[in-house]
Image: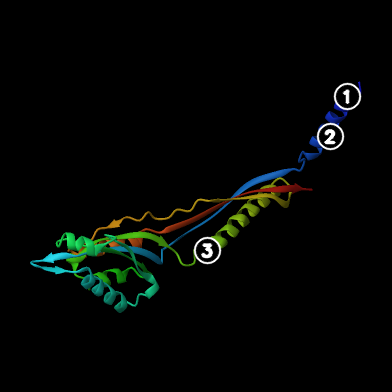
């Protein structure tokens, strides 16, 4: 009998506690948005150079690299924005002894803030030694600051929307209960920029990438506000 009484008491307490946890506040749920497009001002490009035979003479990777380094310097690219990303063979000396015709290659990463310098640099490098070029990714230097500003705008948009909706039915807006952020931003997908002997062909391709591929920042704020008397 005592056990039954104790069980009944526990059930009663559980029901009371559950009832106390029910949120009886009147609420309104709204969504605010803010978005903006920006042109990337940081473009990371990969350039691959490869040795080649000019008749019986080999144009070495050291010669090609020297041309690229000089072009980088002339274009005013900072040292930290120019790095070697990959070498085609882990032991080139062994490969060359085993196969005198072995042609080594190197890949370089260059960070541009002005893509017009891309053509300026490549025009100073032996085109036969350029194996390929690719845009690796894009970025925007003030993106963190812009994201914060857009999130605040989206929240303000949600608050204003809730306020004028409640005003239309003679109700008042209270404090926020929940705020949820949704990032709907989209970034341009990099694509290969295969180098060809025709500088005109590559110029139009490079220009189209930077002129038309923009970063779209878009934020959505889902907010719940209390309705007060």
**Helix, strand or loop for disc 3:** helix
The percent position of residue 125, horizontal first and vertical second, equals: 22, 71
| Residue linked to disc 3 | 144
Work out which residue is located at the far top of the displayed protein and give it: 1
Work out which residue is located at the far left of the displayed protein and give it: 55
Please tell me which residue is depicted at 29% across the width and 79% down the height of the picture.
Answer: 74
**Helix, strand or loop for disc 1:** helix
Disc 1 to disc 2, C-alpha distance: 20 Å
Please tell me which residue is depicted at 43% across the width and 58% down the height of the picture.
Answer: 215
Res. 90 visible in picture: yes
The percent position of residue 45, horizontal first and vertical second, equals: 33, 63
| Residue linked to disc 2 | 16
The percent position of residue 39, horizontal first and vertical second, equals: 41, 63
Front residue of this view, candidates 81 and 75:
81
Q: Coloring scheme of the render?
A: rainbow
* Tags 1 and 2 touching, CB below 8 Å: no
Please tell me which residue is depicted at 74% across the width and 43% down the height of the picture.
Answer: 26
| Residue linked to disc 1 | 3
Q: Earlier in the sequence, mark 3 or mark 1?
A: 1
Disc 3 to disc 2, C-alpha distance: 47 Å
Within 10 Å of the Cα at label 1, are there few (<14), some (14-19), or many (20+) other Cα atoms? few
Q: In screen coordinates, is 67 left or right of 141?
A: left
Q: Is residue 211 above or below residue 229?
A: below
Within 10 Å of the Cα at label 3, are there few (<14), some (14-19), or many (20+) other Cα atoms? few
**Helix, strand or loop for disc 2:** helix
């Amino acid at each position: 009998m005592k056990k039954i009484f104790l069980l009944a008491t526990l059930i009663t307490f559980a029901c009371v506690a559950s009832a106390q946890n029910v949120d009886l506040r009147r609420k309104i749920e709204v969504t605010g948005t803010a978005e903006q497009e920006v042109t990337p001002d940081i473009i990371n490009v990969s350039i691959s150079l490869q040795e080649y035979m000019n008749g019986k003479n080999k144009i070495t990777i050291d010669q090609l690299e020297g041309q690229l380094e000089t072009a980088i310097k002339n274009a005013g690219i900072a040292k930290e924005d120019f790095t070697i990303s990959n070498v085609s063979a882990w032991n080139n000396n062994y490969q060359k002894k085993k196969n005198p015709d072995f042609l080594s290659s190197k890949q370089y990463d260059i960070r541009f803030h002005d893509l017009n310098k891309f053509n300026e640099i490549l025009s100073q490098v032996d085109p036969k030694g350029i194996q390929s070029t690719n845009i690796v990714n894009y970025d925007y230097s003030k993106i963190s600051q812009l994201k914060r500003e857009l999130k605040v705008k989206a929240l303000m948009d949600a608050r204003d929307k809730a306020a004028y909706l409640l005003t239309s039915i003679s109700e008042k807006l209270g404090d926020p209960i929940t705020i949820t952020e949704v990032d709907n931003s989209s970034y341009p997908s990099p694509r290969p920029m295969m180098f060809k002997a025709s500088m005109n062909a590559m110029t139009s391709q490079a220009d189209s990438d930077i002129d038309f591929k923009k970063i779209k920042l878009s934020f959505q704020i889902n907010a719940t506000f209390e309705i007060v008397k």
